[in-house]
Image (cartoon, coloured by chain):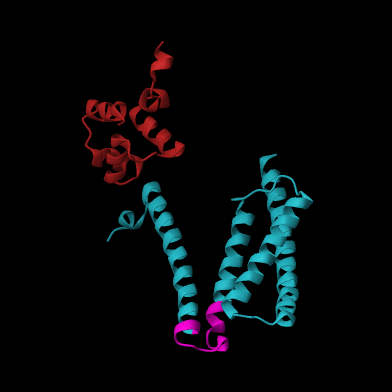
Chain colours: A cyan, B red
Amino acid sequence: MNKSSLKLDERQRQIVRQVTAVMYLFTILYLAGAIFYREHILGQASTEFDDIAILLVINVFGIGLAVLWAGGFVIEKFRLWIIGTVYLAWVVLGTLYTVLIRRIHDWSVILEKIGIISAICAIVTIVYLGVAYLSRRRLNKNLE
Amino acid sequence: MNMKLKLARVAKNWSQQELAERVEVTRQTIGLIEKGQFNPSLQLCIRIARVFGKTLDQLFWEVNENEQK
Protein backbone atom coordinates (compact mmCIF):
# COMPACT_ATOMS: atom_id res chain seq x y z
CA MET A 1 0.00 0.00 0.00
CA ASN A 2 1.61 3.24 -1.12
CA LYS A 3 1.33 6.61 0.54
CA SER A 4 -1.20 8.03 -1.93
CA SER A 5 -3.65 5.19 -1.31
CA LEU A 6 -3.74 6.18 2.35
CA LYS A 7 -4.38 9.84 1.59
CA LEU A 8 -8.07 10.68 1.48
CA ASP A 9 -9.39 13.29 -0.90
CA GLU A 10 -12.07 15.77 0.16
CA ARG A 11 -15.00 13.56 -0.94
CA GLN A 12 -13.65 10.61 1.01
CA ARG A 13 -13.02 12.79 4.07
CA GLN A 14 -16.58 14.11 3.82
CA ILE A 15 -17.96 10.56 3.72
CA VAL A 16 -15.77 9.46 6.63
CA ARG A 17 -16.96 12.46 8.67
CA GLN A 18 -20.61 11.80 7.89
CA VAL A 19 -20.37 8.09 8.67
CA THR A 20 -18.41 8.82 11.85
CA ALA A 21 -21.04 11.30 13.02
CA VAL A 22 -23.88 8.87 12.35
CA MET A 23 -22.06 5.97 14.02
CA TYR A 24 -21.25 8.20 16.99
CA LEU A 25 -24.95 8.97 17.36
CA PHE A 26 -25.70 5.24 17.21
CA THR A 27 -23.05 4.59 19.88
CA ILE A 28 -24.71 7.13 22.17
CA LEU A 29 -28.09 5.49 21.54
CA TYR A 30 -26.64 2.00 22.14
CA LEU A 31 -25.17 3.15 25.46
CA ALA A 32 -28.47 4.73 26.49
CA GLY A 33 -30.19 1.50 25.44
CA ALA A 34 -27.72 -0.54 27.50
CA ILE A 35 -28.53 1.54 30.58
CA PHE A 36 -32.26 1.14 29.99
CA TYR A 37 -31.87 -2.62 29.46
CA ARG A 38 -29.76 -3.10 32.57
CA GLU A 39 -32.04 -1.06 34.76
CA HIS A 40 -35.48 -2.13 33.55
CA ILE A 41 -34.97 -5.59 32.05
CA LEU A 42 -32.16 -6.99 34.19
CA GLY A 43 -33.20 -4.96 37.23
CA GLN A 44 -29.63 -3.94 38.07
CA ALA A 45 -28.95 -1.20 40.59
CA SER A 46 -27.86 2.14 39.13
CA THR A 47 -24.42 1.74 40.73
CA GLU A 48 -23.77 -1.14 38.31
CA PHE A 49 -23.95 1.09 35.25
CA ASP A 50 -22.77 4.40 36.67
CA ASP A 51 -19.66 4.15 34.48
CA ILE A 52 -21.73 4.07 31.29
CA ALA A 53 -23.95 6.89 32.55
CA ILE A 54 -20.90 9.04 33.36
CA LEU A 55 -19.41 8.34 29.91
CA LEU A 56 -22.70 9.34 28.30
CA VAL A 57 -22.91 12.58 30.27
CA ILE A 58 -19.29 13.50 29.50
CA ASN A 59 -19.84 12.76 25.82
CA VAL A 60 -23.06 14.73 25.45
CA PHE A 61 -21.64 17.63 27.48
CA GLY A 62 -18.46 17.44 25.39
CA ILE A 63 -20.37 17.60 22.10
CA GLY A 64 -22.04 20.84 23.22
CA LEU A 65 -18.71 22.31 24.25
CA ALA A 66 -16.94 21.24 21.06
CA VAL A 67 -19.70 22.56 18.78
CA LEU A 68 -19.76 25.88 20.62
CA TRP A 69 -15.96 26.21 20.64
CA ALA A 70 -15.60 25.28 16.96
CA GLY A 71 -18.18 27.93 16.03
CA GLY A 72 -20.82 25.46 14.85
CA PHE A 73 -23.37 27.43 16.81
CA VAL A 74 -22.61 31.11 17.28
CA ILE A 75 -24.61 33.14 19.80
CA GLU A 76 -24.63 36.68 18.40
CA LYS A 77 -26.53 38.29 21.29
CA PHE A 78 -26.77 36.89 24.78
CA ARG A 79 -30.45 37.57 25.54
CA LEU A 80 -31.40 36.86 29.11
CA TRP A 81 -34.87 35.52 28.31
CA ILE A 82 -33.48 32.98 25.81
CA ILE A 83 -30.83 31.82 28.29
CA GLY A 84 -33.50 31.60 30.99
CA THR A 85 -35.83 29.63 28.72
CA VAL A 86 -33.10 27.17 27.73
CA TYR A 87 -32.09 26.76 31.38
CA LEU A 88 -35.70 26.16 32.46
CA ALA A 89 -36.22 23.69 29.60
CA TRP A 90 -33.16 21.71 30.74
CA VAL A 91 -34.37 21.68 34.35
CA VAL A 92 -37.90 20.59 33.34
CA LEU A 93 -36.65 17.90 30.94
CA GLY A 94 -34.04 16.68 33.42
CA THR A 95 -36.61 16.50 36.21
CA LEU A 96 -39.19 14.74 34.05
CA TYR A 97 -36.58 12.24 32.85
CA THR A 98 -35.36 11.53 36.38
CA VAL A 99 -38.85 11.25 37.88
CA LEU A 100 -40.18 9.03 35.09
CA ILE A 101 -37.14 6.78 34.70
CA ARG A 102 -36.57 6.38 38.45
CA ARG A 103 -40.35 6.17 39.09
CA ILE A 104 -40.20 8.64 41.96
CA HIS A 105 -43.54 9.41 43.62
CA ASP A 106 -42.43 11.07 46.86
CA TRP A 107 -42.63 14.88 46.55
CA SER A 108 -39.81 15.50 49.00
CA VAL A 109 -37.51 13.33 46.88
CA ILE A 110 -38.72 15.09 43.71
CA LEU A 111 -37.94 18.50 45.23
CA GLU A 112 -34.52 17.27 46.27
CA LYS A 113 -33.88 16.05 42.70
CA ILE A 114 -35.06 19.40 41.29
CA GLY A 115 -32.51 21.13 43.52
CA ILE A 116 -29.68 18.92 42.27
CA ILE A 117 -30.78 19.17 38.62
CA SER A 118 -31.14 22.98 38.85
CA ALA A 119 -27.61 23.29 40.21
CA ILE A 120 -26.14 20.99 37.54
CA CYS A 121 -28.02 22.82 34.76
CA ALA A 122 -26.84 26.17 36.13
CA ILE A 123 -23.21 25.02 36.02
CA VAL A 124 -23.66 23.62 32.49
CA THR A 125 -25.36 26.84 31.34
CA ILE A 126 -22.61 29.02 32.78
CA VAL A 127 -19.86 26.88 31.23
CA TYR A 128 -21.63 26.82 27.85
CA LEU A 129 -22.15 30.59 27.94
CA GLY A 130 -18.50 31.13 28.80
CA VAL A 131 -17.31 28.88 25.96
CA ALA A 132 -19.82 30.49 23.54
CA TYR A 133 -18.54 33.95 24.46
CA LEU A 134 -14.86 32.96 24.12
CA SER A 135 -15.52 31.16 20.85
CA ARG A 136 -17.36 34.16 19.36
CA ARG A 137 -14.53 36.45 20.44
CA ARG A 138 -11.94 34.10 18.91
CA LEU A 139 -13.85 33.83 15.62
CA ASN A 140 -14.42 37.57 15.35
CA LYS A 141 -10.77 38.23 16.16
CA ASN A 142 -9.73 35.95 13.30
CA LEU A 143 -12.01 37.87 10.93
CA GLU A 144 -10.41 41.23 11.63
CA MET B 1 -24.24 16.72 -14.87
CA ASN B 2 -21.08 18.77 -15.44
CA MET B 3 -20.67 18.42 -19.20
CA LYS B 4 -18.19 21.31 -19.37
CA LEU B 5 -15.71 19.46 -17.23
CA LYS B 6 -16.17 16.23 -19.11
CA LEU B 7 -15.77 17.99 -22.48
CA ALA B 8 -12.65 19.79 -21.29
CA ARG B 9 -11.18 16.50 -20.10
CA VAL B 10 -12.01 14.70 -23.33
CA ALA B 11 -10.57 17.62 -25.33
CA LYS B 12 -7.29 17.11 -23.50
CA ASN B 13 -7.57 13.39 -24.16
CA TRP B 14 -7.25 12.64 -20.45
CA SER B 15 -8.92 9.77 -18.68
CA GLN B 16 -10.70 10.37 -15.37
CA GLN B 17 -7.75 8.64 -13.72
CA GLU B 18 -5.25 11.02 -15.34
CA LEU B 19 -7.21 14.09 -14.27
CA ALA B 20 -7.62 12.64 -10.80
CA GLU B 21 -3.88 12.16 -10.44
CA ARG B 22 -3.18 15.72 -11.62
CA VAL B 23 -5.50 17.25 -9.02
CA GLU B 24 -4.71 14.64 -6.33
CA VAL B 25 -8.12 13.09 -5.86
CA THR B 26 -9.53 9.67 -6.64
CA ARG B 27 -10.99 8.70 -10.01
CA GLN B 28 -14.35 8.18 -8.34
CA THR B 29 -14.36 11.79 -7.16
CA ILE B 30 -13.82 13.05 -10.72
CA GLY B 31 -16.53 10.71 -11.97
CA LEU B 32 -19.00 11.94 -9.38
CA ILE B 33 -18.19 15.60 -10.12
CA GLU B 34 -18.84 14.97 -13.81
CA LYS B 35 -22.11 13.26 -12.97
CA GLY B 36 -23.08 16.16 -10.74
CA GLN B 37 -23.31 13.92 -7.69
CA PHE B 38 -20.53 15.57 -5.71
CA ASN B 39 -19.99 19.28 -5.17
CA PRO B 40 -16.25 19.93 -5.03
CA SER B 41 -14.82 22.58 -2.73
CA LEU B 42 -13.69 25.87 -4.18
CA GLN B 43 -10.07 24.81 -3.65
CA LEU B 44 -10.57 21.65 -5.71
CA CYS B 45 -12.42 23.63 -8.41
CA ILE B 46 -9.45 25.98 -8.62
CA ARG B 47 -7.01 23.06 -8.86
CA ILE B 48 -9.08 21.53 -11.67
CA ALA B 49 -9.35 24.87 -13.49
CA ARG B 50 -5.58 25.37 -13.20
CA VAL B 51 -4.68 22.02 -14.74
CA PHE B 52 -6.96 22.82 -17.68
CA GLY B 53 -5.70 26.40 -17.95
CA LYS B 54 -9.30 27.62 -17.80
CA THR B 55 -11.31 29.87 -15.50
CA LEU B 56 -13.85 28.61 -12.98
CA ASP B 57 -16.63 30.11 -15.10
CA GLN B 58 -15.53 28.17 -18.15
CA LEU B 59 -15.63 24.87 -16.27
CA PHE B 60 -18.27 25.20 -13.60
CA TRP B 61 -20.62 28.10 -14.27
CA GLU B 62 -24.06 26.97 -15.29
CA VAL B 63 -26.19 29.49 -17.18
CA ASN B 64 -29.87 29.20 -16.33
CA GLU B 65 -32.76 30.27 -18.56
CA ASN B 66 -33.32 33.63 -16.84
CA GLU B 67 -29.69 34.63 -17.36
CA GLN B 68 -29.81 33.68 -21.03
CA LYS B 69 -32.71 36.12 -21.55
Which of the image's four quarters has the C terminus of chain B? top left
Work out whether A3 lies above or below B45.
Answer: below
Location of residue B63 in the rendering, given as x and y in whole percent from the top left corner: 39, 20
Residue found at x 32% / y 53%: A4
Q: Relative to the observer, which residue lies in front, B4 or B17?
A: B4
Q: Residue at x 30, y 55 (%)?
A: A5
Residue A113, horizontal then vertical, whole percent: 71, 77
Q: Is residue A4 left or right of residue A82?
A: left
Highlighted range, magenta: A39-53
Residue A41: within the magenta?
yes
Q: Residue furthest top?
A: B69
Residue B57 screen position, x and y as percent: 41, 23
Give the camera-side residue of A61 and B52.
Answer: A61
- Measured from the top left, where is residue A7 in percent x and y? 36, 54
Name the one closer to the observer, A125 or A139: A125
Q: Residue at x 67, y 44 (%)?
A: A142
Task: Confirm whether the magenta stretch covers residue B18.
Answer: no
Q: Main secondary structure of the magenta part?
A: helix
Query: In the picture provided, is A112 more to the left or to the right than B67?
Result: right
Q: Quadrant of the N terminus of chain B?
A: top left
Asked where in the image residue A141 lies, by quadrant, the reply is top right
Residue depicted at x 32% and y 35%:
B36
